[in-house]
Amino acid sequence: MLALLMPLAVYAQMTYPVARCSDQVDDYFGQKVPDPYRWLECSDSADTRQWIAAQNTLTNTYFASIPYRKAMVEQVMSACSYIHYTAPYRSREYYYYNAFSSTQDQGILYRRKGPDGPQELVVDVNKLSPDHTARIEHFTHSADDHYAAYIMSRAGSDWGEIYVMDLHTLQLLPDHIPWIKFSGIAWQGGGFYYCSYPAPLAGQELTAVNKNQKVYYHKLGAPHDSLVYSSINPNLIYTVDVSEDEQYMFLSKKDITSGGNALLYRHRDSVYFQSVERHTGLAFYDYVYSDARSAIILTGAHANNKKLMIRDFREQMDHSFIEEDPKAIIEGAKAAGGKLFVFYQRDATDHIKVFNMKGKFENEIALPGKGSVSGFDGQADDKVVYYSYTSFIQPATIYRYDIASLTSTVYHASESAFDPSAYEVKQVFYRGLDLERVPMFIVSKKGLSDKEPHPLLLMGYGGFGQTPSSYFNPMLAPFLEQGGIYAVAGIRGGGEYGGAWHRAGSGGNKMTSFMDFIYAAKYLIKHKYTDKDHLAITGASNGGLLVTACANMKPDLFKVVIPEVPVTDMLRFPAYTVGSGWMTEYGSPADPADFSLLYTYSPLHRISSTAVYPATLVLTADHDDRVVPAHSYKYISTLQHIAGPHTKAPLLIRIDTNSGHGASTIRKAIEAKADIYSFIFYNMGITPKL
């Protein structure tokens, strides 16, 4: 009976909450653009709160009707029910690391005296907020490991506050700095540098545009902080680093509206900054390491795949250090134990090469397969360093790397019950719009039959030069166990093949990114991994822009669309928080030529009044102050109003509370993933065996 009734439940016509339409119309260079749901941009208004409540009631009722939704939550929870550790790093006599478990909402920071000493609790952030949404970032040690400062945020917000801990007693000091955003912490002497925007005015929404960031120095115990750097340019954003010997401070300043950055530095005895030579283009310069004589800097100047350069302090000159590799991208570098560990990426997989501090190659660390690596954090006198290796089907394993012998040994094997031998990862290459070779990973159980289509979830990002990591996510296991296939397309706009790959899918070339993704879907159908009735697509943030744009372009190609915290209003995105910084990626709606392009693909403005849309579940959160939820609110209201009357598949939004640009707790992440899988299976008419 359930099997007979399920198709009726899936395709029953939905009745959506009524959202009032205002008469708001904007004029862009003579083009009249209606914006009837502008009022939803005011997230704290009574009308918006009422609308949110109505939408959540509809969505919760829908999920309550899915008979296996509760079992799916339990399945995802079970897959996560093991302790996951990060690679330890040394600070003086202690080794610090984090532990994560599905039984806790946040990770817990521990330390050991020596690599194998007894475990000691440092901070359990789960006890720092009643709803367990507090999280800690940038736990940073003073040079003598007497103190640590960290940034704690709540409810998923990008706003946070700095606290200081005495690491001898593990007690907090009175020092407390509120209203911190997009900042690190860099110790020098008896205090540290940090970056801060002006605090929001009374009654001002946290989604207000962020301008005029400044750099400050806080001396422990001091009642007031010293202003170190500011500018009349309100669009600058800063990053501060300090050398291990604390002799030099490095200051990166970037205009978020134009791209590229300048890197300044000064000796601790000087008040004047020197500048690393800036390339005339939009190149970047990232600090890596320095001693008393010179600094190592990662740059994209004259190097599509990036290179490492040296700034000689005495000569005030820049020199090449490790040249660009034409076949691999340098993603970063870390110095420890008198060696430089350089992170390369080739065909979207990580490779680690070791150089001495003169730039001479010594060896490449053998990795177990095609995956992702993190770690190698350490100090100049370390004898060993630790790193973590993971892949789509390999839970994270922590390795101990002996610097003298150049050997790796397992330090901690994963405690996950997941069996990698039952699954496989294929890397294929397909042809994009202009026959460009595009990489894609395909993950599945071994031995799947090719005689029938399988539910397939295709993920993409394609923006800001970022490459999706091939890491193990235990929440993927239940989907794979049900015969699902997971695919990740390395489309243009990302960083898979360096700066040129990014530029080929950004700005005026953004449509190329979308077409690469559509061609990935067509490849998967052509090669019989799935069909149109079993194909779901997903992406988060810029990836949400990707899948909503593709749903507008090819609504009949997909069965299910899952945009998470998506950017959908390409005409209003600069109006909130740091959205103006995205103009280097998308262009400016205030520019006539850019507006013409943005308007042609803006998901909010390109919803068809005649097309039948796939089942759509938009995920957002009320405290997302990076991609503000108004993007999702306006998009789903428009989709329901324009496409809802003739689309029988559900068009829903899931609005999480006390979360931000991603789930604020492990439990919330588990529930969201279970809802995604339930939504996919239910709309494909599949009953999972749970």
Image: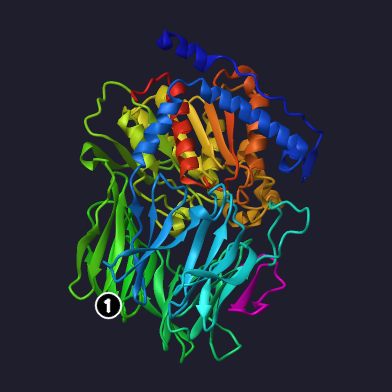
Query: Does 224 appear in magenta?
Result: yes
How many numbered circles does the render carry?
Answer: 1
Q: Residue at x 52, y 23 (%)?
A: 64
Q: Mark 1 packing: few (<14 Cα in 10 Å), some, or many (20+)? A: few
Q: Say whether residue 651 is visible.
A: no
As rendered, which of 420 and 656 lies closer to the eye? 656
As rendered, which of 502 and 384 lies closer to the eye? 384
Q: Residue at x 60, y 72 (%)?
A: 175
Q: Position of residue 559 (x, y in %)?
A: 47, 25
Q: Position of residue 236 (x, y in %)?
A: 64, 67
Return the residue at label 1. Answer: 360
Q: How is the image coloured?
A: rainbow
Q: Is residue 227 above or below residue 390?
A: below
Which quadrant does the N terminus fall into? top left
Where residue 435 sits, quadrant-wise, is top left
Magenta residue span: 213-237
Q: Residue at x 41, y 45 (%)?
A: 103
As rendered, which of 65 and 365 lies closer to the eye? 65
As rendered, which of 293 and 4 lies closer to the eye? 4
Where residue 651 sits, quadrant-wise, is top right
Query: Does 614 appear in magenta?
Result: no
Q: Position of residue 592 (x, y in %)?
A: 71, 50
Q: Residue at x 37, y 28 (%)?
A: 525
The amino acid type found where label 1 is placed reads Lys
Which quadrant does the C terminus fall into? top left
> Callout 1: helix, strand or loop?
loop
Q: Is residue 161 above or below residue 190?
A: above
Q: Position of residue 570 (x, y in %)?
A: 64, 44
Q: Say whether residue 478 is visible.
A: yes
Q: Is residue 537 above or below residue 595?
A: above
